[in-house]
Amino acid sequence: MGEMGVVTRFAPSPTGMLHLGGARTALFNWLYARHHGGSFRLRLEDTDRKRSTPEAIAAITDGLSWLGLEWDGEIVRQSERRERHVAVARGLLAAGRAYRCYCTPEELEAMRADARAAGRTALYDGRWRERDPAEAPSGIDPVIRFRAPQEGETAIDDLVQGPVRIGNGALDDMVLLRADGTPTYMLSVVVDDHDMGITHAIRGDDHLTNAFRQTQLFLALSWQPPFYAHIPLIHGADGAKLSKRHGAVAIGAYDELGILPEAMRNALLRLGWSHGDDEIIDTDQAIAWFDLDAVGRGAARFDMEKLKSLNGHYIRASADSALLAAIEPRLAVAYPLAATDEGRRRIVTLLPEAKTRAKTLVELADRLAFLVYERPLAMAPKAARLLGEEGGEARARLARLAGALRPLAAWDEEALESAVRAFAEREGVGLGKIAQPLRAALTGAEASPGIFAVMAALGREETVARVNAVAIIAAERKAEAEG
């Protein structure tokens, strides 16, 4: 098969979200196709009409788009191909590779109980396999079952698991068409994979048993089965199967948490695939390196802390303009000033410093939010204490400082630092006695980026206004208390 021949697919059932496991499967299929210059297809296994709502489908396509995993060609919807699936089942029936089964639900339940009691996996006992359809009971709509091989074994050379095989006696005659004429999942997958020209089916190893049944069906139809690659499931950092208690399970939630798509791709890539000791692998590098021989067989562990530290790396590497575009809408919900030219100017001034310390876009937005607060600022308790000390001394000093700052010729960090230091000297106090209350007045908090950088970012007018607002409010409160 030529390199150009590779066709992979991601085939989720739309059930309302794109899970981490599904996202990782999609990524591996996408990377494998891109690495080999092939194509990556998206197929929605949407035969469960109740669950396959437009919202559920959007959750998958939006999740893939956010991750940057663009698919090739039209989306294939399994539900729209039902007539083709039925026709294939009828062809198998005509060729003697399938048969009608008239078992009642009660008979099937009894068979299941027998198989369980005997410890057998094969549930259906094949009782209509050789029976004459003339004996069919009236009033029962038959299902169509696959006449599975009973002797020998079915072998798959799995590209991740290695050679795997199963004795054919362990698999029963599966249903291809239900009594109401609808095709089963097993049949639809085989027909769709064949018709779409899928060469490689890369999916979770919970599908391994399905692969044996699907291979039998491919061979019965004289079709070439795809190469299978069954990748291990994802566990939490504690080694237990991934669940809600390990953090968000749906990809959309990571966007809300402020994870960048490129960090998410990097984290998903490292779930069960590795390249030496490399941890930070961008998408171009991943496409160049990715192949199935480096996928591990053991369960991969997803670690939220690891994702956050990767995300911090990608935030530091991002252009300030891209970060501004990402955090502005997050801030503007609470602080409309963030979406104005002045708000953006302030944010961009402190972004280079703030992005070195934030691990998520949420943290980054939180670090810069004080720049776009409305006056008067809400004060954190520690900040309020800084302004409440020494019977109004700090506030009186701030009022004097505002007067000294207003006429400054230049308003940049250097000019501000020398002005504030000179002011502290005139007042006969250390710089901290000025800087701490000043920080509280300007940010509403006791910790912030460098105070002179903060003043430069806020600009002359806002800095003086915030300092005066605190001095005035404090003076009014003091008067009330004494009155």
Image (cartoon, rainbow, N blue to C red):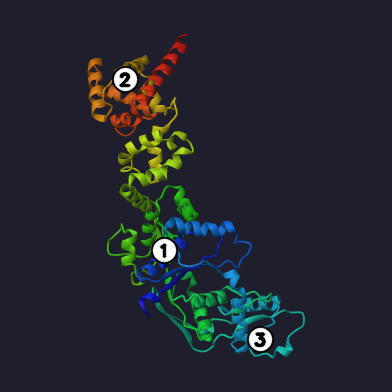
Mark 3 = which residue?
Answer: 128
Q: Quadrant of residue 410?
A: top left
Quadrant of image for the N terminus: bottom left
Q: Are marks 1 and 2 in contact (CB under 8 Å)?
A: no
Q: Residue 13: give x, y in percent of width and height.
A: 54, 65
- Crowd around label 2: few <14 · some 14–19 · many ≥20 (10 Å): some
Where disc 1 sits, the SS reads helix
State the image coordinates of residue 98 (x, y, percent, origin top left). 61, 85
Q: Could you tell me the amino acid type at mark 2?
A: Arg
Q: In 3D space, how far apart are the residues under numbered discs 1 and 2 (Cα atoms)?
A: 56 Å
> In the image shown, does 314 or 129 lie closer to the viewer?
314
Mark 3 secondary-structure assignment: loop
Q: What amino acid is labelled 1 in the image?
A: Leu
Viewer-nearest of discs 1 and 3: 1
Please give the name of the residue rendered at 43% of the width and 76% of the height, measured from the top-left corner. 199
Q: Residue at x 46, y 57 (%)?
A: 65
Q: CA distance from mark 1 to mark 3?
A: 44 Å
**Mark 2 falls on what kind of element?**
loop
Q: Name the residue beneath numbered marker 1.
A: 27
Q: Which mark is residue 406?
A: 2
The residue carrying pointer 1 sits among few (fewer than 14), some (14 to 19) or many (20 or more) residues within 10 Å by Cα, namely many
Q: Nearer the viewer, mark 3 or mark 2?
A: 2
Q: Quadrant of residue 97?
A: bottom right
